Image: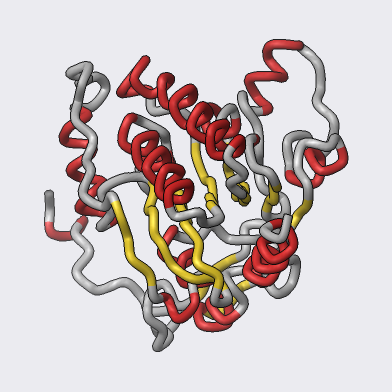
């Protein structure tokens, strides 16, 4: 390349860099308001302008619910194997390891025992950042163990869902988890166990077709996508336009699929009141 063509001087500076660290500001995907990180955190990661609920991690939900964030985690070290030797489009074993390194979690659900306003509970919280919160054999096993623990110790069971559905990489093993968790919940219910589920954005596929819809009380966060197959698939199948707000919490509440919609800042007090009332039965 001849010298005359080369750029010798640096680009003209038209602005000076502001003194802000990356990740300090968030833009609301719903109303585009720009929100300072600490303001968002203080408001439970809910937009103060339009009440949009940002997705939060399982640790954040545990911190929100459990008194003083003081809990015992159980079944922590169960890790998925690759039972079908699944390698396409990506080696499943490596994918699991990469996700463990990235999220610092061993699976898409964290199960703990702790207190909510001084009431002992078993709490399971799913994490969408772990392979889309998908349910494979480990998630199914951890949910089952949580149900058994709640049954043995006669404690209320709370599960917070967030899931893209069954985990494709484990094929039929994933589908078996629907029957496994549902039958355990049925037995728990027969023995008088209390199960409250909170559906968060998104709760879809195998989770909505099993533990998501089997709560004695089914709560949901505002404007969460809750469905089995997504709106695009349904639209293609039936060849018709779908009603406004289809498959949101508000739509499902109107159709009687869920019991109530709860803002994030009211989750703890709502669950506390429900346990107090229902445990007296
Ligand atoms: Zn907003």
Residue at image position (56%, 55%) is 156
Q: Position of residue 243 (x, y in %)?
A: 85, 30
Q: Is residue 14 above or below residue 271?
A: below
Q: Position of residue 26 (x, y in %)?
A: 53, 70
Horizontal arrangement in the rendering, residue 207 relative to residue 49 (left or right) = left
The color scheme shown is secondary structure
Query: Is residue 201 visible to us here?
Result: no
Residue nearer the viewer, 224 or 107: 107
Residue nearer the viewer, 175 or 5: 175
Query: Is residue 28 visible to us here?
Result: yes
Horizontal arrangement in the rendering, residue 156 relative to residue 2 (left or right) = right
In what quadrant of the picture does the C terminus appear? bottom right
Q: How many marks?
A: 0
Q: Position of residue 263 (x, y in %)?
A: 71, 64
Residue at image position (38%, 28%) is 167
Q: Is residue 69 above or below residue 227?
A: below
Q: Is residue 162 above or below residue 268?
A: above
Residue at image position (45%, 78%) is 24
Residue nearer the viewer, 127 or 70: 70
Q: Position of residue 162 (x, y in %)?
A: 52, 45
> Residue 105, located in which quarter of the rendered image?
bottom left
Q: Is residue 280 above or below residue 232?
A: below
Residue at image position (66%, 38%) is 226
Residue nearer the viewer, 117 or 8: 117
């Amino acid at each position: 390349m001849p010298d005359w063509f080369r750029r010798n001087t640096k680009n003209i500076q038209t602005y000076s860099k502001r003194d802000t660290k990356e990740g300090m500001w968030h833009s609301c995907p719903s109303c585009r308001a720009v929100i300072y990180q600490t303001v968002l955190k203080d408001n439970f990661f809910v937009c103060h302008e339009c009440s949009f609920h940002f997705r939060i991690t399982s640790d954040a939900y545990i911190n929100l619910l459990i008194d003083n964030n003081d809990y015992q985690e159980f079944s922590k070290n169960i890790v998925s194997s690759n039972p079908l030797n699944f390698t396409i489009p990506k080696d499943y074993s490596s994918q699991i390891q990469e996700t463990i390194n990235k999220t610092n979690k061993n699976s898409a659900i964290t199960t703990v025992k702790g207190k909510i306003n001084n009431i002992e509970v078993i709490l399971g919280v799913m994490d969408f950042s772990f392979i889309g919160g998908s349910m494979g054999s480990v998630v199914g096993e951890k949910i089952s163990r949580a149900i058994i623990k709640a049954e043995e110790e006669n404690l209320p069971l709370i599960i917070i869902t967030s899931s893209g559905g069954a985990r494709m990489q484990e094929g039929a093993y994933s589908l078996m988890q629907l029957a496994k968790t549902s039958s355990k919940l049925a037995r728990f219910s027969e023995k008088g166990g209390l199960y409250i589920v909170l559906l968060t954005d998104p709760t879809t596929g195998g989770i909505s077709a099993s533990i998501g819809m089997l709560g004695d009380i089914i709560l949901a966060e505002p404007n969460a996508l809750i469905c089995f197959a997504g709106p695009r698939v349904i639209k293609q199948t039936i060849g018709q336009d779908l009603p406004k707000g289809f498959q949101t919490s508000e739509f499902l509440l109107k159709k009687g699929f869920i019991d109530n919609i709860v803002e994030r800042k009211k989750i703890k007090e709502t669950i506390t009141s429900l346990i107090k009332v229902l445990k007296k039965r």
